[in-house]
Image (tube, coloured by chain):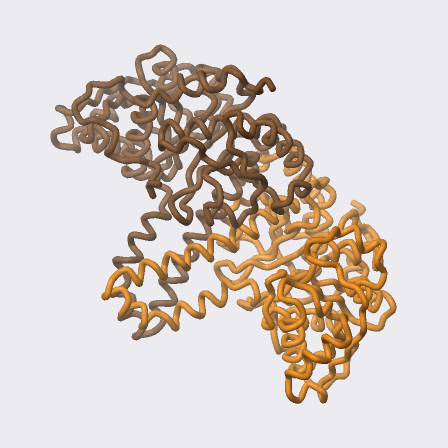
Chain colours: A orange, B brown
Amino acid sequence: MSADPAGGEPGVPATVAALPVALDAAGGDHGAPPNVEGAVEAARAGVNVLLVGDRVRLHAELGRHPGSASLPLEVVHADDAIGMDEHATDVRSRPQASINICTRLVKEGRASAAVSMGHSGATMASALLTLGRLKGVDRPAILTHLPARGGFTTMLDVGANADVRPAYLAQWAQLATVYLRVLEGREQPTVGLLSIGEEDHKGSALVLEAHALLRELHGHGVNFHGNIEGRDIFLGTTDIVVTDGFTGNVCLKLAEGEAKVMFGWVRDAIQSSVRGKLGGLLVRPALRGLADRMDPSTYGASILIGVRGLTFIGHGSADARAVKNALLRAARAHEAGLVPRLEAAFRPAVPTP
Amino acid sequence: MSADPAGGEPGVPATVAALPVALDAAGGDHGAPPNVEGAVEAARAGVNVLLVGDRVRLHAELGRHPGSASLPLEVVHADDAIGMDEHATDVRSRPQASINICTRLVKEGRASAAVSMGHSGATMASALLTLGRLKGVDRPAILTHLPARGGFTTMLDVGANADVRPAYLAQWAQLATVYLRVLEGREQPTVGLLSIGEEDHKGSALVLEAHALLRELHGHGVNFHGNIEGRDIFLGTTDIVVTDGFTGNVCLKLAEGEAKVMFGWVRDAIQSSVRGKLGGLLVRPALRGLADRMDPSTYGASILIGVRGLTFIGHGSADARAVKNALLRAARAHEAGLVPRLEAAFRPAVPTP
């Protein structure tokens, strides 16, 4: 089991002139700079990138990276962009918005994937509107990774669907299984259904119904472990954790917040005495590796799984490293043929007995 | 703001022969030993305790604590006990089960509170059946504390109700407000509604409706801050976090699991090099204080709020320290008149304009 599902360099040959990844290059809290820097780094690692956004702004930004002119980077002009404070539904009326251009490039086969650190809701809406859903999938979900004992845990949905039906959870288990098989080489990843007790009869009405559906799928494309609890996410009890987008989003943000606050406490505790400060200097390198592991930018971005085309959604606060990792991951997902594999595996949505 | 809501010694005069707390003395994963040890420690700190369980077993266990005969401890015999693997509904047909005797002692005014580290579902069922609900409260909730930046965050419901209605959340905000006012001296604690975005219009259908109810209560006994996200629990953005029992339980267990796994990683990282090991020896005392703060036994047990009588539910894995802290907290809640204060504050369930 790899400790880092973002993958990074392995799997992306540096010489292949592959279909480029379309990056919403003005998206995110910090605008163009981290996007362009991340794209330059990804291009150096062999990924072709289309930078979608204001032409003048992007060329100016590229000018700050010596040697970028010889990299497989291209600028695609977009007049418009959906701001972080605007409405997701604006994608309907603003076809020239950068995110819409990205998803259209995917739809038209001119880009392998769309990646955005911008408005998450707008990215989801644009992907759904332009690319549509895979056959057999009622609602796409956001799939992400959390660090866990022994590696990482794959969780979905972490925010696309606040209110869900049991069937969605069963479909997400199938999607995530194929995802891990194709991208991480895990043939039979285990699936846990997030609940408030391990017993089959415990949980919300939603969980009880989803449990029954997942039981039926067990052995038919899904390796269903049963119900799991909140603590199992970090313990890595199952490879995949399936939950509704409300609970999943709360979990993701709680986990990030807790890690941040706990590292602050460790730092404060160490610096509260001379003895601790001296020890702190000695343990710092070891702790740095750990902080890195807990850093969301290691994972780059999350895939919107279930749409007919690769779409990755990152943190608004993404830095260049996150952008780079997201682009590498998108290229890997394309090369591995994730979307066709999802389509193929998904055809018999419910197994015939 | 105190860093430890369990309170501990302050507020419990060592000399008052107050109404005793009834402890379900065989409850929990480890049976009588941690319960009796915790009761002995609480009695030494001035809390009267009724140990409810098998007479022979409890006297034998007390015999292992020299000097316990002179402490304000009394054994109340119970023939029966609900095992951790039995059904919560068994409390209906087994009146002599220890937890039922505990809640009856509260009902009859012979004990100030019932405390159990045993079967949570059975404790809830027994409390509801024997003590009933406060007027104006549809469903009691489990209220607990999580460590947070600047102190702690009070969260409810963390597991009593997997499926809820918007009105429950509004009632829980009122209950928790009175709880913090009475027990922690916070006059206007802030209330956050757990959601997946701070914006008023984001969230599940449940959250949107609960948000409207909480807006109405703002200024009428509830200091409503608005929606908060998962990260705010550890950031301590609001004093109180209100959520359904499914999300709350998942959050609680995720937070505990993450702390445990992260501490393991810090230990492993430090021990992975000679340099780190040396530094580790120096930072150990500082980190020990932090581990203590993250330890659920610091908080003892959680109150089942909304029933007509004090009921505290602890971890099955509780150690003597958790039992002691739970008993101290129960005594404090009784002395502060929590239940009458809840009843009084709750009378006008919905404010008249």
| Residue at image coords 64%, 59% | A188
Of A304 and B9, the residue lying toward us: B9
B221, A160: nearer the viewer? B221
Q: Is residue B167 above or below residue A220?
A: above
Residue placed most toward the observer, B217 or B273: B217
Counting every numbered tag in the picture gives 0
- Left or right of residue A254: residue A99: right
Horizontally, residue B114 falls left or right of residue B69, namely right
Locate the C terminus of chain A by quadrant: top right
Could you tell me which quadrant the N terminus of chain A lies in? bottom right
**Could you say which quadrant of the image residue A168 lies in?**
top right
Q: Measuring from the top left, give residue A269's x and y in whole percent.
A: 32, 58
| Quadrant position of residue A332 | bottom right
Specify whether A15 is left or right of B187.
right
Q: Residue furthest right?
A: A108
Q: Place residue A280 in its image quadrant.
A: bottom left
Residue drawn where x is 28% and y is 60% of the image:
A272
Q: Position of residue B60 (x, y in %)?
A: 20, 28
Q: Position of residue A247 (x, y in %)?
A: 60, 44
